[in-house]
Image: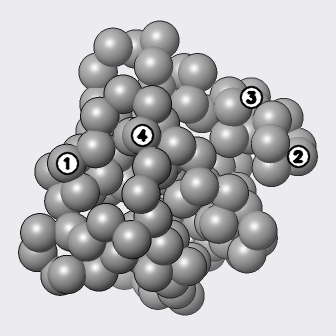
Amino acid sequence: MNEELKDKWFDESIKDRISKIHLELEDDAVGLWQIIPFGRQGYGLAGEDLVEYVRRSLLALFAHGAIPVQGAIDGIHYWEPVDRFGADPESMVQGVIDEWLASSEDPDPGGLWFAMPSSCEILKADHPE
């Protein structure tokens, strides 16, 4: 994968985009449904290059403390942690990628996201939509 490849919308290299992906965590979770299509459509990646882009993006998020989450179904919280991928970054990345590739589909907004652990403590009542 060519890290200097620029995306077609913002003229930002893959290297620069991955180095900044964690900044979104300050305001919101980052969805897998956002990462994969941007790699495919923005950079024109496919196959192993797309997988490597996703891998590096996830590692960058996990390096800054993010964890896999999904929408909470308790009606109280926004997010709940997803622990089926293990606890260390490499296991989480491989588990996420394996699940994505096995599905034969791109994820949608109802699927897996990545957020700071503190996001799982935010109550809907304290932050109405």
Mark in front: 1 vs 3: 1
Residue 84 bears which disc, if any? 3
Q: CA distance from mark 2 to mark 3?
A: 12 Å
**42 up-or-down from 129: above or below:** above
Q: Is residue 88 left or right of residue 110?
A: right
Q: Nearer the viewer, mark 4 or mark 2?
A: 4
Q: Amino acid at mark 4?
A: Asp
**Along the line of sight, the residue nearer the viewer: 39 or 115:** 39
Residue 83: x and y in percent read: 77, 37
Tell me whether the residue at label 2 lies in contact with that at label 3, contact meaning CB atoms closer than 8 angstroms.
Answer: no
Q: Residue at x 47, y 36 (%)?
A: 51
Marks 4 and 2 in Cβ contact (< 8 Å): no
Q: Residue at x 25, y 71 (%)?
A: 6
The residue that disc 4 covers is: 49
Q: Nearer the viewer, residue 83 or 59?
A: 59
Q: Which residue is mark 2?
A: 88
Marks 4 and 2, how far apart at CA? 23 Å
Q: Residues within 10 Å of mark 1 (few under 14, many from 20)?
A: some
